[in-house]
Image (cartoon, rainbow, N blue to C red):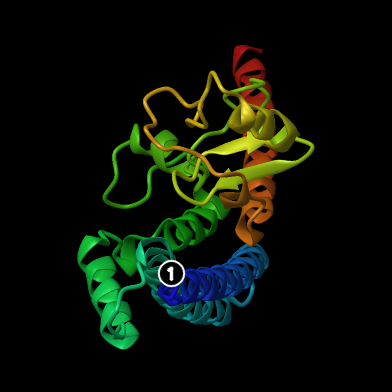
Amino acid sequence: MASTSAPRNNAAYGRITSAASTLYSDNQTLIAEIRKATIMMKEIAVDFERDNKSEEIIGIMNVKELEDGLLELVKASDECTRLSNAIQSVGNEYQPGDGLTNFSKLFDDKIEKSKADSSSVSQNHPWLRQFREAIWNVHHAGQPMPGEEQEDIVMTSTECNLLNTKCPLTGKPVTELAEPVRSMDCKHIYEKKPIMQHIRSKVAQGRCPVAGCPKKLQADRVVCDPLLLIEIDELRSMSKQHARDDVIEDFTQLDEED
């Protein structure tokens, strides 16, 4: 009599991976919404800081309250990220066996491992850092924040959350990609059509085209995740701001020469 354990195991594996993929996607959508909220809070705080000349105390209170609220959102985002990592790990590593799998313990173990591996401290989170820099630059543009050196300005004010800013296949900046996608595994970003052709190529064997990256890509795990378009738009805004700052600096130098 033919064994039915293999088909059952395959069916269980399919359900688990499908559920993990759905939960991961939902969680990424939540992180994207949190990011939108932090960007909005930063813009409101900058407006408060810029317009509070005659109401300085009220303005400071408003900015401080927004910063405290943003810190809470950063902590929530960090928790969601750990949850996403745990979901992704369970979905990738689950192997059906003869016995019952204790998913509760498996998931808890992944959460704890994610916490241990995470070096992120909420107070040093890039989103919070960008908020504070934006407020500081309203009245102190070009000056180092308290406790920093001058050369730190360039390093921190140009930070973005994207791992690569150009498609490794086309050479186009990610801000100009028609259909940007990101690997769920190595987090590199590509133009969709070229990377799908690359994955199907027998020569490339599905390896990530970024030099030094050892990951093998799977077509269903190279996607436009909810956070990607937000981060690309943020990079686009940062580039425009830096361009405006350069123009202002050039005019300032001309005035000094005159």
Residue at 43%, 41% in the rendered image: 143
Q: Amino acid at mark 1?
A: Ala
Q: Determine the image quadrant of residue 203.
A: top right
Give the percent coordinates (x, y) of residue 17.
50, 68
Judging by the rendered image, the residue that carries numbered circle 1 is 6
Q: Disc 1 on helix, strand or loop? A: helix
Residue at 65%, 64% in the rendered image: 43
Quarter of the picture holding the C terminus: top right
Q: Is residue 203 left or right of residue 240?
A: left
Q: Determine the image quadrant of residue 25.
A: bottom right
Give the percent coordinates (x, y) of residue 63.
53, 74
Outermost residue to the top: 257
In this rendering, the answer to whether 30 lies above or below 231 is below
Q: Is residue 157 left or right of residue 94?
A: right
Residue at 47%, 27% in the rendered image: 210
In this rendering, the answer to whether 241 lies above or below 77 is above
Residue at 31%, 82% in the rendered image: 101
- Name the residue nearer the viewer: 35 or 42: 35
The answer to whether residue 245 shows anywhere in this view is: no
- Name the residue nearer the viewer: 110 or 63: 110
Q: Determine the image quadrant of residue 114.
A: bottom left
